[in-house]
Image: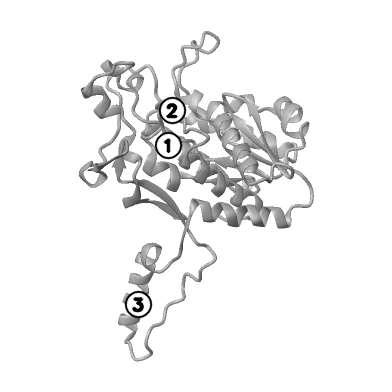
Amino acid sequence: RKGYWKWENSRSSFDGNPNVDATIMPLFTRYQPVECRDVDSNFCNDRVSTERFRPYEFYFLDNNDDDDGIMIPNNHTQQQRQMQQYHHHYHQERQYQTLLSTNDKELRVMQKLRSTTKEKIKLCFVGASHSRKMTQAFNKLFVDSRTADIIEAYLLDVKFPRSVDADFIRGNILHWSCTKTIIAIGQWAASASKNEKYSHIPPISFPDFREEYRNMMKALNDLNVSGVHLRSIHLNPLGDLRFKCPAEDYRHPSVLEVYNEIIRNLTELEEFKNISFIDTDFIIGPMWDSSPDFCHFPPEGEIARAEALHILETVLFGSS
């Protein structure tokens, strides 16, 4: 893990009322009952409200620290030394390692970006609405940090892995001379779309999803595309369409987790050793049920900002 969400007492009051303490609000899973779409009632509001997440703030582990920097007396037995080493590594995230707030992480990453960049960087995000929101989050980050003159994010809109073929790659990734390409395509693959153009396409099975991703990765390699990273697909909250029987939307967390495992396993194959997997689940996973619209993370929100910083540091500086 590279960080975690931490409860902050300073965020513990709700709606400006300091008498309502977050400590008395259990963090139950957020979901949308079938009867609660666009319904304003106490029953529905209790289940769909995002207020339960407000007290939590994300902290990065400081990867500049020496993880093994512990002192063990020489007179300890081998068993005692091993036990102390075990307890150190088990608890190092919270006891030993320095934490960085998202603000501090941003300052560090953007300073490094400014000091090392010689030519303008083009980050290309391949995907649909989640990649669009991420592109917006990145460009907001660059504007806020006054680095938009040296780096910019672009969206290359595509809904299915099979669409990233040789023609798409030549006409988009290579045409725009993308410095780094970050791909995440899986939301439409798992949904049962009501869009007239795609309504006849059923959700993509796991074997077919693997085959589509593999073909996409092979096409990227065949055209010698460098700097390619596959981002983990965001998990979606339990919205009403996923609760219906039969379901009208199959973007259930358990389905998307299998998609992510498929992608990770493909990047571990020898033939795709030049394509990396960026797992942002340590940021997204604990907050998987928090997106306001039961699908997307707002570009201006803390989740999107933390994810953007992690991805940026990974693709530019090799941190992982």
Label 2 and label 1: CA atoms lie apart by 18 Å
Secondary structure at numbered mark 1: helix
Q: Quadrant of residue 258?
A: top left
Q: Nearer the viewer, residue 64 or 217?
A: 64
Residue 145 picture location, percent across and down:
63, 46
Secondary structure at numbered mark 2: loop
State whether residue 207 appears in this view. yes
Say whether disc 3 or disc 1 marks the residue closer to the N-terminus: 3
Q: Nearer the viewer, residue 75 or 116?
A: 116
Badge 3 is on which residue? 82
Label 3 and label 1: CA atoms lie apart by 36 Å
Badge 1 is on which residue? 258
Above/below status of 27 relative to 318: above
Above/below status of 156 relative to 81: above
Residue 47 picture location, percent across and down:
26, 28
Q: Amino acid at mark 3?
A: Gln
Say whether disc 2 or disc 1 marks the residue closer to the N-terminus: 1
Horizontally, residue 121 falls left or right of residue 77, namely right
Which quadrant of the figure contains the C terminus? bottom right
- Tell me if label 2 and label 1 are in contact, CB under 8 Å: no
Q: Amino acid at mark 2?
A: Cys
Label disc, if present, on residue 295 of the rendered structure? 2
State whether residue 268 appears in this view. no
Q: Residue furthest bottom?
A: 75
For label 3, the crowd category at 10 Å Cα-Cα, with few meaning under 14, some 14 to 19 and many 20 or more, is few
Q: Quadrant of residue 97?
A: bottom left
